[in-house]
């Protein structure tokens, strides 16, 4: 690991799902989130905001083209077959029962949300909203290898990294998938630390098997790899985070230096970016880069 420098630690943050704001420009969204992510990080580290120089990669518009703000009359089911397929793979990993109607597998969103909410002691309505939002955006990104949305989101992340030239890239949730692909697609981007938080990168069928580049090897020993330009990769997951499954990312990827678990928050706060950013494991990972 590189020694700390006298100046602020340069970081590019890559958000997860749920950040799309059609009423604001990209510059406005970035300007709003930079101080928030900085505050969460400095709160955990116990340092002033001046110690960090953070930029924010905002890719959400590329995955939400033509979408409107979500209202109260969302349909009960997921109509898109890719979105349903991804949700089914996720539920299988969680061990959810598979409902069958008239001999055909069905995937009612309400049923899935109720089961997940009961297992993890969550609010049922909020869980349904999260599942819908999460899998719609994941499907928008992973639908095909060469979709314009996937390329645009990946290149937006790569552009922020190229412009800001950070020592550290911190990505959360779906952002870990996009950052992983962006760093692979641009090996010229040299990053000292890739910190993935609450990552679904290893989720079979839904994410892992759709990654670019494809994991190599024969199942079940198929493995992804650390991007060439990344000197060190650290992953952090709350042990109760239903998005960061299966646990232990290092079982599915080579080159991960540390695969850490930390209970970041009770209730559904265990997947919120702010709780990952301020947790003890994140502070311990970033501290040496600040001379702490």
Image: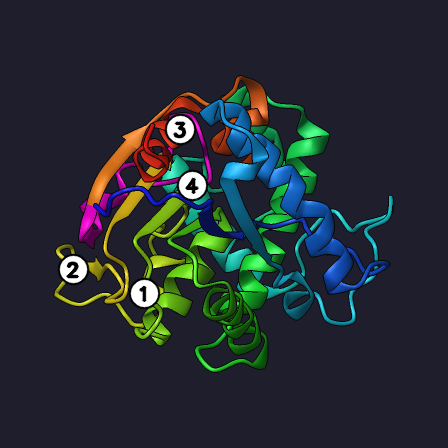
Instruction: Quadrant for residue 110, please give it.
Output: top right
What separation in Å lies between label 4 and label 2 (alpha carbons)?
Answer: 25 Å
| Residue pointed to by mark 2 | 219
The one nearer the camera, 236 or 277, is 277
Q: Which element carries disc 4, helix, strand or loop?
A: strand
User: For the N terminus, which image quadrant?
Assistant: top left
Left or right of residue 251, residue 199 in this image: right
Expressed as whole percent of the image width and height from the top left, the position of residue 87 reads: 51, 50
Precedes in sequence: disc 4 or disc 2: 4
- Frontmost of labels 4 and 1 is 1
Mark seen at residue 197 = 4
Tell me, yes or no, whether the two marked residues, 4 and 1, touch with CB atoms within 8 Å: no
Precedes in sequence: disc 4 or disc 1: 1
- Frontmost of labels 1 and 2 is 1
| Residue pointed to by mark 3 | 283
The secondary structure that dominates the magenta segment is loop
Left or right of residue 34, residue 211 in this image: left
Q: Residue at x 48, y 76 (%)?
A: 144
Expressed as whole percent of the image width and height from the top left, the position of residue 274 reads: 57, 32
State whether residue 112 appears in this view. Answer: no
The one nearer the camera, 155 or 49, is 49
Q: Residues within 10 Å of mark 2 (few under 14, many from 20)?
A: few
| Residue pointed to by mark 1 | 190
Precedes in sequence: disc 3 or disc 2: 2
Q: Range of the magenta residues? A: 237-256
Marker count (numbered): 4
Precedes in sequence: disc 1 or disc 2: 1
Q: Residue at x 12, y 64 (%)?
A: 218
Q: Residues within 10 Å of mark 1 (few under 14, many from 20)?
A: some
Expressed as whole percent of the image width and height from the top left, the position of residue 173 reads: 49, 46
């Amino acid at each position: 690991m590189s020694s700390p420098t006298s100046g602020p630690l340069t970081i590019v943050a890559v958000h997860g799902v749920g950040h799309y704001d059609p009423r604001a420009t990209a510059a406005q969204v970035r300007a709003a989130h930079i101080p928030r992510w900085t505050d969460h990080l400095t709160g955990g580290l116990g340092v002033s905001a001046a110690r960090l120089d953070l930029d924010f990669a905002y890719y959400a518009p590329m995955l939400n083209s033509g979408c409107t703000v979500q209202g109260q009359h969302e349909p009960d089911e997921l109509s898109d077959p890719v979105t349903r397929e991804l949700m089914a793979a996720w539920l299988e990993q969680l061990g959810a029962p598979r409902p069958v109607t008239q001999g055909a597998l069905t995937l009612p969103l309400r049923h899935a949300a109720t089961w997940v909410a009961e297992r993890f002691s969550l609010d049922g309505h909020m869980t349904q909203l999260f599942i819908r939002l999460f899998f719609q955006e994941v499907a928008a990104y992973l639908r095909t290898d060469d979709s314009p949305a996937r390329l645009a989101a990946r290149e937006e992340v790569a552009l922020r990294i190229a412009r800001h030239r950070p020592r550290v890239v911190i990505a959360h949730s779906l952002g870990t998938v996009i950052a992983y692909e962006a760093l692979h697609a641009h090996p010229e981007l040299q990053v000292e630390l890739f910190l993935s938080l609450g990552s679904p990168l290893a989720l079979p069928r839904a994410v892992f098997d759709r990654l670019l580049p494809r994991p190599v090897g024969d199942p079940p020993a198929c493995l992804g790899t650390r991007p060439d330009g990344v000197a060190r990769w650290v992953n952090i997951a709350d042990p109760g985070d239903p998005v960061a499954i299966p646990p232990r990312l290092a079982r599915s990827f080579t080159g991960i230096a540390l695969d850490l678990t930390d209970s970041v928050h009770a209730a559904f706060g265990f997947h919120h970016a702010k709780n990952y950013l301020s947790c003890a494991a994140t502070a311990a990972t970033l501290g040496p880069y600040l001379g702490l």
